[in-house]
Amino acid sequence: MTRISMAAEATTTKFQNPDFRPDFHPDISVTAHDGLHFWQFMIAGSIAGSVEHMAMFPVDTVKTHMQALGSCPVKSVSVSQALRSILQSEGPSALYRGIAAMGLGAGPAHAVYFSVYEVCKKYFSGDNPNNSIVHAVSGVCATVSSDAVFTPMDMVKQRLQLGNNTYKGVWDCVKRVLREEGFGAFYASYRTTVLMNAPFTAVHFATYEATKRGLMEISPESANDERLVVHATAGAAAGALAAAVTTPLDVVKTQLQCQN
C-alpha cells in the first residue's frame, strides 16, 4: 500500500510540475487553406460579411452623414452631433434606411472576398503559410474582386442613408440612377474604393495573421480552446489600424457616391 501511495504521489507531482509538457505539441502555425472547400469559404464569408454590416449599420449611417457634403445642418460635425441631427430630423428609423441595399450587396461581395483571399493565400504561400507579404497580396486580390461586386449597392445604400426623400427605396434608386446618370454612376467611386480598400486590406490581413499567430504562440497549449478570442482580438486590432490608415479616402469615396 505504501509503494502504491508513493507511486501515485510521484505521478501527481509530475503532472503538477510547470516545466512538464506532454508528448503532444499543438501546431500553432497558420495553415494556408484551413482545410475548407471553396464553397465553404463563400458561405462563411457571406454570412460573416452580412452579420458584420447589419450589426454596424446605424454606425455606418452616422459615418456617411459625417462624410457627405452638406448632409447635416450643423457645420462642425461630431459623432454625437450627427447622431442627434439624424434622430431629431428623421427619427430612429433613419439609422436603418438603406439596409436592404446593404443586404443585397454585402452577402455576395463578402462571399467573393473571403473565397478569393483563401484561394490566393493557398496559391502564393507555398511552403510558408505565415508569410505576411502573401497575406497582404492575397488581401489586395480579394478586395479588387469584391469591390467590383459591392460598389454599386454601396452607392445605392449611401444615397438612401442621406435621405432627403429623394428615393422611395432600393429599386427606385437603381432605376432613377440608371435613367438620369447612366450605368457609370454605380462605379463612380470604384477606383477610389480600390485605392482605399487595397491598402486597408493589405494592412488588415497582414496585421490580423501576425496578431493571431502571436496570440496563439503566447499560450500554445490552449490554442484551440481560445481560438474564438484569438480571432476576435486579432480582427479588432487589424481593423482599427487599417481604418486609421484609409479613412481620408473613405471620405472621398462617400462624396463621389453621393454626388448627382
Image (cartoon, rainbow, N blue to C red):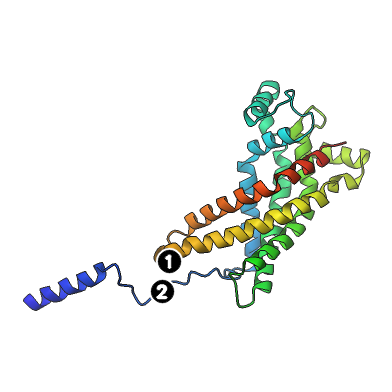
Which quadrant holds residue 259? top right
Residue 89 position, x and y percent, is 70, 21
Left or right position of 214 against 71: left
- Which residue does the image show at 78% across and 39% down from the upper left? 170
Disc number for residue 25: 2
Percent position of residue 252, x then y: 79, 42
Q: Residue at x 71, y 41 (%)?
A: 100
Tally of numbered discs: 2
Q: Residues within 10 Å of mark 1 (few under 14, many from 20)?
A: some
Vertical order, 256 against 212 (above or below): above
Rounded to the nearest angstrom, the CA distance separating label 2 from label 1 is 8 Å
In this picture, residue 219 sits left or right of residue 190: left
Residues at marks 2 and 1 touching, judged by CB atoms closer than 8 Å: yes
Identify which residue is drawn at 71% across, 26% down. 76
Q: Residue furthest left?
A: 2
The residue wearing badge 1 is 220
* Foreground pick, 86 / 237: 237
Does residue 55 appear left or right of residue 191 in this picture?
A: left
Whether residue 224 is visible: no
Would you say 3 lies left or right of 169 here?
A: left
* Camera sees residue 235: yes
SS assignment at label 1: helix
Instruction: Pick whichever of labels 2 and 1 is earlier in the sequence.
Output: 2
Front residue of this view, candidates 42 and 34: 34
Q: Given the image, on which type of amino acid does mark 1 rest? A: Pro
Residue type at mark 2 is His
User: Residue 193: where, in percent of width, then height?
Assistant: 77, 50
Residue for point 78% across, 44% down: 253
Q: Nearer the viewer, residue 106 or 226?
A: 226
